[in-house]
Amino acid sequence: MFPAIYGFGLLQAITWPAGPRKMVRLSDPAFTTLVYMLFQVVYLSATVILLSSLDQNRYRFEVSCFLTVLLGLALSWVLRRGFAVDRVRTAD
């Protein structure tokens, strides 16, 4: 489940809208925060897997909050898409 959540976050970062004025994505605080969370998940996971042979659950504590936020983003995206489909069906 964690790779799917991370993949969703990565997909959101890649397809992030640039806005009506085509402003740079890095100036958007939400985009910068998403990229920071994705980087921290990869960095901490790689560090723990490559350098530590024991007690890996201790470092997962620091990544769990980021994955929870990404799960919340995924759930809100699914719910928003579901309500949009319902509105289109009722409008017809």
Image (cartoon, grey):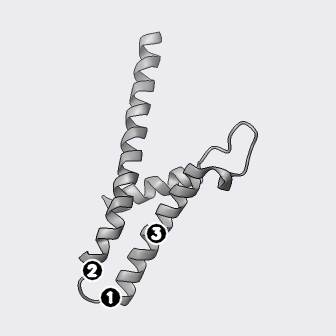
- Residue under the point 42% across and 68% down: 41
Give the residue pinned by disc 3.
40
Sequence order check, earlier mark of 3 and 1: 3
Please tell me whether mark 2 sits on a helix, a strand or a loop.
loop
Give the residue pinned by disc 1.
52
Q: Which amino acid lies under the numbered mark 2 shown in the image of this protein?
A: Gln
Q: In this view, does 21 lie above or below 24?
A: above
Q: Residue 25's spot in the image, x, y percent?
A: 66, 52
Quadrant housing the N terminus: bottom left
Q: Which amino acid lies under the numbered mark 3 shown in the image of this protein?
A: Gln
Mark 1 is surrounded, within 10 Å at the Cα level, by few (under 14), some (14 to 19) or many (20 or more) other residues, namely few
Q: How far apart are marks 3 and 2 (CA)?
A: 16 Å
Kindly indicate whether the residue at mark 1 contacts the one at mark 3 (C-beta within 8 angstroms): no
Mark 2 is surrounded, within 10 Å at the Cα level, by few (under 14), some (14 to 19) or many (20 or more) other residues, namely few
Q: Which amino acid lies under the numbered mark 1 shown in the image of this protein?
A: Ser
Q: Is residue 81 above or below residue 71?
A: above
Q: How far apart are marks 3 and 1 (CA)?
A: 17 Å
Give the residue pinned by disc 2.
56
Kindly indicate whether the residue at mark 2 contacts the one at mark 3 (C-beta within 8 angstroms): no
Q: Residue 61's spot in the image, x, y percent?
A: 29, 69
- Residue under the point 54% across and 60% down: 35
Q: Residue 87's spot in the image, x, y percent?
A: 44, 18
Q: Which mark is residue 4?
A: none
Kindly indicate whether the residue at mark 2 contacts the one at mark 1 (C-beta within 8 angstroms): yes
Please tell me whether mark 1 sits on a helix, a strand or a loop.
loop
Relative to 11, 47 lies left or right? left
- Residue under the point 45% across and 71% down: 42
